[in-house]
Image: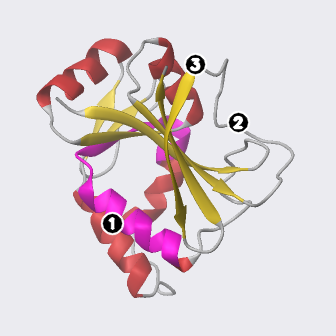
Amino acid sequence: MAKLVYALNQSLDGYVDHMAFAPEPALFRHFIDDISSVAGTVYGRRMYEVMRYWDDDQAEWGEEERAYATAWRSQPKWVVSRTLASVGPNATLITGDLGAAVGALKTRLDGVIEVAGPELAQGLTDLGLVDEYRMYMHPFVVGSGKRYFAGPRPPLRLTASDRIGENVIRLTYVPA
């Protein structure tokens, strides 16, 4: 049975604005290794649209960006949306019962399925489906935007803290 993990970068004040800070090289390498190892990722529509950037090669990319894009493209993706009619390569659209669809993925797959998107993660948290929370804390204060927790924070228990690169701490929590 797969473990559902909500993993996302966040600022010190709890925001997940991907435009406010970029990962330093060590963290980016960590993310290449991470995306290469997961069984797949469940995306909310908005986060999926942001990540579609990796579908098409960019002339300015270096070796690391190309490695991330290759890994991202190879992984299965499930996109939860009420508005999209189709999704890109290696992606499946989820339009029906979120709990049933994600529960079936957890039962059918092994390893880690990541969740990307605060509102989607909140819905899955409310359904009791998120097994682990990984907060990549960056030393920035953003002040506004989408929060890591889109609703009330569930009771959590800290299980690990890891320094990644020079400036990021990954905090790992499980439901208490």
Total marks shown come to 3
Residue labelled with disc 1? 33
Eye-nearest disc, 2 or 3? 3
SS at badge 3: loop
Residue 17 highlighted magenta (yes or no): no
Residue 43 highlighted magenta (yes or no): yes
Q: Amino acid at mark 1?
A: Asp
Part of the protein shown in magenta = 26-48
- CA neighbours of label 1 inside 10 A, class few (<14), some (14 to 19), many (20+): some
Residue 155's disc is 3
168 relative to 67, above or below: above
Residue 137's disc is none
Q: Amino acid at mark 2?
A: Arg
1 relative to 64, above or below: above
For the point 28% across and 33% down, which residue is it? 3
Q: CA distance from mark 2 to mark 3?
A: 17 Å
148 relative to 16, above or below: above
Judging from the image, the colouring scheme is secondary structure
For the point 27% across and 45% down, which residue is it? 40
Image marks 1 and 2: residues in contact by CB distance under 8 Å: no
Marks 1 and 2, the one that precedes in the sequence: 1
Report the magenta stretch's main SS. Answer: helix
Marks 3 and 1, the one that precedes in the sequence: 1
Q: Looking at the image, which is closer to me, 81 or 143? A: 143
For the point 37% across and 70% down, which residue is it? 68
Residue 147's disc is 2
The quarter holding residue 22 reads: bottom right
Q: CA distance from mark 1 to mark 2?
A: 25 Å
Q: Amino acid at mark 3?
A: Pro
Residue 14 visible in the current orientation: yes
